Image: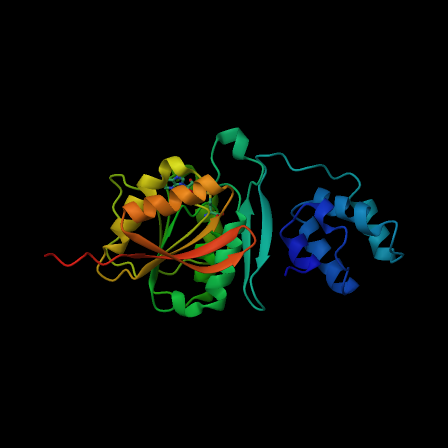
Amino acid sequence: MLSLCDKLYQQLNVKDLLEDPLGDLEELRAVLQEVSEVNAYYVRQFLSARLVDQCDEDWVYEMYVDLLSSRPLRPDEPNVLVYRLGDTVRVSIREMPRLISAVNTTGFRTWRAATSLSKLLVEHRELTRGKTVLELGCGTGLSSITVGVLDEYKKLYVTDGDTGILSEVTTPNLSLNKVERDVQCQRLVWASEDRVPGDIDVVVGADITYDPTVFPELCTCLDECLQQPKCQCAILACTERNRETVHELHSQCAQHSLSMECLQAEDAVKIYKITRRPAAPSA
Ligand SMILES: C[S@@+](CC[C@H](N)C(=O)[O-])C[C@H]1O[C@@H](n2cnc3c(N)ncnc32)[C@H](O)[C@@H]1O
């Protein structure tokens, strides 16, 4: 369950924050101050909707007046969202959440499945401890950066099919969070001439199962990953948006002899452990 401060750090829609308890006002003030440095207009909206008429603290009015001249960020203007993933893990992600329609790609914002996967990776550090980790379709990079911030990995391959995303958001986000040790950020288009690294132990991916037309390529790539000598499993966080897509994913995995075990189901996000079915013994 996210606290109001967690939601403000992630700049969730103000309309969805109208019922949350305000909690400690000093903490709230500090969070709003921090968020206003990257998105003043968002904080102004929140103050107007939640605090100006309901709270008589002087700082509320002072902050609101200071922000009156703020304007909404343009779709191509970067924003920095903060994800608190457990008591001590904090990841900052520079993203352009409203850029999807403009450039026809989905990787410029962080998707909900990535926050679920990142929390699971924090709660189950053994999944990546001492391991060489490959992320597929990393987008802004939250899942890889979470593994990076935990700093127990052996090596990280952070990949996406879109080189624009890798250079404009993923690489700057790795630097922003100081994840620079043994990290390779590179293009990996599924089932293409791009080769899967041979030394991987585990694969992770978040919200890469939204388009059924690319499932054959994705499953071919997962199969290739799982055929690497040390690769044990892939952990995929999938936002299940409709029944047909879910059915098609299960069917494509079965056709590629991949087993899916559901590790966690939270609202529409399911996290699956994918392994390769052992080949049937020959007669
Ligand atoms: C919905 S975004 C998810 C991004 C990130 N994992 C997250 O959850 O925030 C899907 C990502 O998969 C990448 N992608 C889509 N098709 C791909 C393909 N065929 N090969 C490699 N990456 C692909 C996109 O570029 C995009 O960054």
Q: Residue at x 67, y 51 (%)?
A: 35
Q: Position of residue 8 (x, y in %)?
A: 68, 53
Q: Position of residue 54 (x, y in %)?
A: 87, 53
Q: Quarter of the picture for ligand 1?
A: top left
Placement of 219 over or under 133, stated as above or below: above
**In the image, is 94 to the left or to the right of 153?**
right
Placement of 268 over or under 244, stated as above or below: below
Q: Considering depth in this image, is 101 or 187 the residue closer to the camera?
A: 101
Q: Considering depth in this image, is 131 or 278 the residue closer to the camera?
A: 278
**In the image, is 228 to the left or to the right of 161?**
left
Q: Residue at x 40, y 45 (%)?
A: 137
Q: Residue at x 38, y 35 (%)?
A: 213
Report the residue that reaches farthest toward the left.
283
Report the residue that reaches farthest toward the top.
102
Q: Which quadrant of the structure image shows residue 189?
A: top left
Q: Can I make out residue 226 in this image? A: yes
Q: Can I make out residue 187 in this image? A: no
Q: Considering depth in this image, is 15 or 278 the residue closer to the camera?
A: 278
Q: Position of residue 3 (x, y in %)?
A: 68, 60
> How are the colours assigned in the image?
rainbow
Q: Quadrant of the N terminus?
A: bottom right
Placement of 73 over or under 102, stated as above or below: below
Q: Which quadrant of the structure image shows residue 86?
A: bottom right
The number of callouts visible is 0
Q: Position of residue 212 (x, y in %)?
A: 40, 38
Q: Residue at x 71, y 48 (%)?
A: 16
Q: Quadrant of the C terminus?
A: bottom left
